[in-house]
Image (cartoon, rainbow, N blue to C red):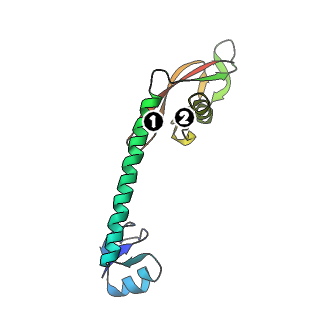
Amino acid sequence: MKVILLEDVKKQGKKGQVVEVSDGYGRNYLIKNGLAKEATGAAMGQLKAKQRAEAKQAEEDLAEAKELKTKLEDDKTVVEVKAKSGDDGRLFGTITSKQIGEALEEQFNIKVDRRKIDLANNLAALGHYNVPIKLHTDVDAKIRVHVTEA
């Protein structure tokens, strides 16, 4: 019996895959528990349409990420973050990815989730920094951050 998996099933396959299982296992466990549905012609058509829609959405997300990368890496895009510091240029505290994300949205109206800002360590001194941002699985960008005296 062929079934389309609606969820990941251990030792059978991932969600959306068409797998061959025994009749009893398919009817009495997978279909009954909502883990799969029978692979009829209509169900296969729905699956293919859904996969095409997901592929189209993935392409749009990638194009959007590439467009955002060009905005972020533009020469004019330098995020200014003000912080209090001592005489030697070291900050009282640090600049976090959350603060960088807020400053980016405030200054350039570009919203980037703080979890995508890939700071190895928080910024602890005055100066210019190149901060990597993970926009998409295939798209990485670098944003310039300038930490100045408040």
Q: Is residue 126 left or right of residue 135?
A: right
Residue appearing at x 38%, y 66% in the figure: 14
Pointer 1 with pointer 2, Cβ within 8 A: yes
Decide which of 120, 99 is in the foreground and name it.
99
Which quarter of the image is occupied by the C terminus?
A: top right
User: What amino acid is labelled 2 in the image?
Assistant: Ile
Badge 2: residue crowd in 10 Å (few <14, some 14–19, many ≥20): some
The answer to whether 40 is drawn above or below residue 97 in the figure is below
Residue appearing at x 46%, y 83% in the figure: 32
Q: Which mark is residue 109?
A: none
For the residue labelled by badge 1, is the local secondary structure a helix, a strand or a loop? helix
Q: Position of residue 149 (x, y in %)?
A: 66, 16
Q: Position of residue 65 (x, y in %)?
A: 43, 40
The answer to whether 22 is drawn above or below residue 64 in the figure is below
For the residue labelled by badge 2, is the local secondary structure a helix, a strand or a loop? loop
Q: Is residue 147 left or right of residue 92?
A: left
Quarter of the image holding residue 64?
Answer: top left
Q: Which mark is residue 68?
A: 1
Q: Earlier in the sequence, mark 1 or mark 2?
A: 1
Residue appearing at x 35%, y 68% in the figure: 47
Quarter of the image holding residue 38?
Answer: bottom left
The answer to whether 12 is drawn above or below residue 130 in the figure is below
Decide which of 77, 35 is in the foreground and name it.
77
User: What amino acid is labelled 1 in the image?
Assistant: Leu
Residue tagged by mark 2? 110
- Alpha-carbon span between mark 1 and mark 2: 8 Å
The answer to whether 50 is drawn above or below residue 137 in the figure is below
